[in-house]
Image (cartoon, rainbow, N blue to C red):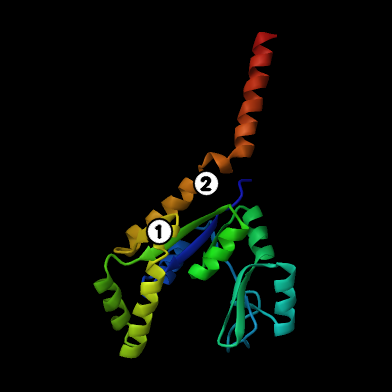
Amino acid sequence: MQRGILIILSGFSGSGKGTIVSKLMEEYDQYTVSVSATTRSPREGEQEGVHYFFKTTEDFEKLIRKGAFLEYACYVGNYYGTPEGPVEELLAQGRDVILEIEYQGAVQVRSKRSDVVSIFVTPPSIEELERRLAERGTESEEVIRARLERAVEESQHMDEYDYILINDDLDVCTRQLHELVCAQHAKAVLQKEFISQIQEELKDKMHRRNA
């Protein structure tokens, strides 16, 4: 069985990356979104191991010391992180695992693992980004401005990603993302077991023909 691909998916707030992930999961059955761990309390309807792995602060910090996270951060007094163990299990099962994380988390993951493809999602223009943020209808002008200021910072790191995915059309963008992952599967560096198999079969074939 071929191992899965570890996928970092980042993007501006309003780029539509969450919608793309949902569409990807609907159309292709090879993907799994990683489940994060957190020290915040469960909200109504949230299930352990489905929405989050809920940890005490003490347990989370023990896991940090053990190096058990691919990435982690502290937001508003609570820890959030991606446990490496469950991700590794899914990859070994041949699942392609999506980490929907920000740049700081992406840096941590890439420093720990080389078997990762990083993709940054963006709308075709900043005017479109601003329009999408405004169309949500749930955020004040102050919040929109803060998100755009954050986008300014994030844009400085776009060239550090392997691929830039322009989300102009949801269907097209979803298909392109899937094609990028399929291309990763075909890379020779990830096909070592298959290459060895072909080499051995050819040697055996020639040995029998020459016997």
Name the residue beneath numbered marker 2: 185
Q: Earlier in the sequence, mark 1 or mark 2?
A: 1
Q: Secondary structure at mark 1?
A: helix
Question: On screen, 206 above or below 122?
Answer: above
Label 2 near label 1: C-beta < 8 Å?
A: no
Q: Quadrant of residue 57?
A: bottom right
In the image, what residue occupies the spot 40% across and 58% down? Answer: 159
**Residue 9 image offset from top left, x and y in percent:** 47, 64
Q: Residues within 10 Å of mark 2 (few under 14, many from 20)?
A: some
Q: Is residue 36 left or right of residue 155?
A: right
Name the residue beneath numbered marker 1: 159
Q: Nearer the viewer, residue 91 or 106?
A: 106
**Residue 105 image offset from top left, x and y in percent:** 54, 69
Q: Residues within 10 Å of mark 1 (few under 14, many from 20)?
A: few
In the image, what residue occupies the spot 71% across and 67% down? Answer: 67
**Residue 54 image offset from top left, x and y in percent:** 66, 81
Q: Nearer the viewer, mark 1 or mark 2?
A: 1
Q: Quadrant of residue 13?
A: bottom left
Question: On screen, 64 above or below 169?
Answer: below
Q: Give the residue type that dot 2 points to.
A: His
In the image, what residue occupies the spot 61% across and 36% down? Answer: 194
Which disc number belongs to residue 172? none
Measured in 3D between alpha carbons, the distance from the residue under mark 1 to the one under mark 2, in whole angstroms, is 22 Å
Question: On screen, 100 above or below 117?
Answer: below
Q: Give the residue type that dot 1 points to.
A: Asp
Q: Secondary structure at mark 2?
A: helix
In the image, what residue occupies the spot 44% across and 59% down? Answer: 160
Can residue 79 be seen in the rendering of this structure? yes
Can residue 101 be seen in the rendering of this structure? no
Q: Is residue 134 left or right of residue 66?
A: left
**Residue 150 image offset from top left, x and y in percent:** 39, 77
Q: Which image quarter is the C terminus in?
A: top right
